[in-house]
Amino acid sequence: MKKINILLAVIIVAAFTFTSCNKDKVQLPKIETQADSLNYAFGLANGNIITNFYLQPYKANPDSLEAKISLLLQGIDKATKEAEADKKEADNKDEIFQLGLQFGNSFKQQMKDGLLGVSTLAFNETLVRQGLINALYDFKEGMTALEAEPYLNKTMKSIIESQTVPKNIDTVAPDSISAN
């Protein structure tokens, strides 16, 4: 009987530990720079897209929605942590898990290339993930998922334009160029 009580106590403590250490909970992130803001907005925008196009059928059943969000995050984790995760997980045919693998592979590439391919903007996996989670759970504090996409588009456009337009260049009006 003592062994059963000890085993039961260990199981209860383990269950409490796993549920209290949930890294995937909604919360406001600590934003210090424009790059932080862009990473968080990127996660929010993608979470909004996933919610609207892939998770909509599961919204009526909270348990089913929670299970699909969990599968999505598992797929992202697999892809970002392992080489060629999509081949290792080919046996899991769930479309949401596969979507997670696709997002995770994209995130892994951005870890190398920079946020949205801009090498001067470091990809912050923690902030992107928090934005994604906040959008998936429809968290309304701070920037919302609906505000994220226009902010992200406008700011990224400005950053890219400032990097591609040469500074201190003499411009010539098109009508002053003679055709030879």
Image (spheres, rainbow, N blue to C red):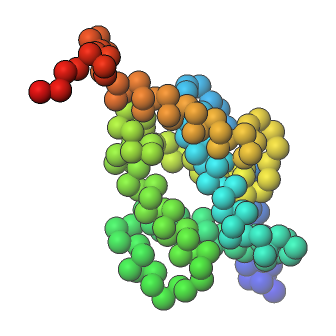
Which residue is nearer to you in this view: 7 or 66? Answer: 66
Residue 164 seen by the camera: yes
Give the image quarter of residue 79: bottom left
Quadrant of image for the C terminus: top left
Total numbered circles? 0
- Determine the image quadrant of residue 14: bottom right
The residue positioned 34% from the left and 48% from the top of the image is: 112
104 w.r.t. 132: above or below: below
Q: Residue furthest left?
A: 180
Q: Residue at x 31, y 19 (%)?
A: 175
Q: Is residue 136 left or right of residue 71?
A: right
Residue 75's quadrant in the figure?
Answer: bottom right
Q: Is residue 163 above or below residue 94?
A: above
Which quadrant, please, contains the N terminus?
Answer: bottom right
Near-viewer residue (77 or 95): 95
Q: Is residue 141 left or right of residue 47?
A: right
Q: Is residue 7 left or right of residue 155?
A: right
- Quick one: which residue is furthest to the right in this view? 60
Instruction: Say above or below: 123 vs 50.
Output: above
Q: Position of residue 81 (x, y in %)?
A: 43, 62
**Residue 80: image location, x then y, percent:** 44, 61
Q: Residue at x 26, y 11 (%)?
A: 170
Taking the image as drawn, is residue 131 in sight? no
Residue 97 vs residue 114: left or right? Answer: right
Residue 26, percent across and down? Answer: 75, 49
Q: Residue at x 66, y 48 (%)?
A: 44
